[in-house]
Image (cartoon, grey):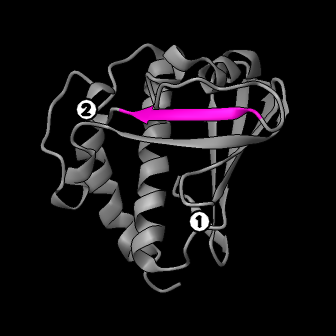
């Protein structure tokens, strides 16, 4: 399922995982578990707490592929520091992102698993930002699905490149 623009500068995603809110929550807050699908780093689990994210996209899968030219600056990793805005374990985590934008992740228990809703607000409202951020979250959540299922995730950059082309077409008209 593709993410969608729900307002200017706001992307929204939903993913269903055959898991529990408690297990998925651990993959949001624990540095080692988060590092398997997004990025490692300390997270102070209180409102106003510090969030550090260290992205090593090439380490998310044993499969290799070249880093796209546009993202060569991330070849050796990428880092930023944010702040926890809201936290209500194991259902809500909201924090600032590197460009002053905000990410909110909500988890809801359902009969056969958990629904993850991710909203990324205050993004630059241009096609390049929309397609890059949408493809990034899409790919990271695809990797989270693989990790939760115990399967080998695909190469981040290859998956990112393929889905970014879809998002460039899908979000172009907005």
Check if residue 173 falls in the magenta segment: no
Vertical relation: 60 (above or below) 76: above
The secondary structure that dominates the magenta segment is strand
Magenta residues?
49-55
Helix, strand or loop at disc 2? helix
Quote the CA–CA distance across marks 2 and 1.
Answer: 26 Å
In the drawing, does residue 124 fall left or right of residue 136? right
Image coords of residue 60 (percent x, y):
33, 27
Residue at figure coordinates x 28%, y 25% from the top left: 59
Q: Is residue 99 above or below residue 137?
A: below
Q: Nearer the viewer, residue 120 or 20?
A: 120
Q: Position of residue 121 (x, y in %)?
A: 67, 62
Q: Position of residue 39 (x, y in %)?
A: 46, 31
What residue sits right under mark 2 in the picture?
A: 58
Q: Is residue 72 left or right of residue 26?
A: left
**Count of numbered circles on the image:** 2
Q: Nearer the viewer, mark 2 or mark 1?
A: 2
* Circle 2 crowding by C-alpha within 10 Å: few under 14, some 14–19, many from 20: some
Helix, strand or loop status at disc 1: strand
Q: Which residue position is annotated with label 1?
A: 4
In the picture, measured across the screen, residue 24 lies left or right of residue 152, that is: right
Mark earlier in primary sequence (2, 1): 1
């Amino acid at each position: 399922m593709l993410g969608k623009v729900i307002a200017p500068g706001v992307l929204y995603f939903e993913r269903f995982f055959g898991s529990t809110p408690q297990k998925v929550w651990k993959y949001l807050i624990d540095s080692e578990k988060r590092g398997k699908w997004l990025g490692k780093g300390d997270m102070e689990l209180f409102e106003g707490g510090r969030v550090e994210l260290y992205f090593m996209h090439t380490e998310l899968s044993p499969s290799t592929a070249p880093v796209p030219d546009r993202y060569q600056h991330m070849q050796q990793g990428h880092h930023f520091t944010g702040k926890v805005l809201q936290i209500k374990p194991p259902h809500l985590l909201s924090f600032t992102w590197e460009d002053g934008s905000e990410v909110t992740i909500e988890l809801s228990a359902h009969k056969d698993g958990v629904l993850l809703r991710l909203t990324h607000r205050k993004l630059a409202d241009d096609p390049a930002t929309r397609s890059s951020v949408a493809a990034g979250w899409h790919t990271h959540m695809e990797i989270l699905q693989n990790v939760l299922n115990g399967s080998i995730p695909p190469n981040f950059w290859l998956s990112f490149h393929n889905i970014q082309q879809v998002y460039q077409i899908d979000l172009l008209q907005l």
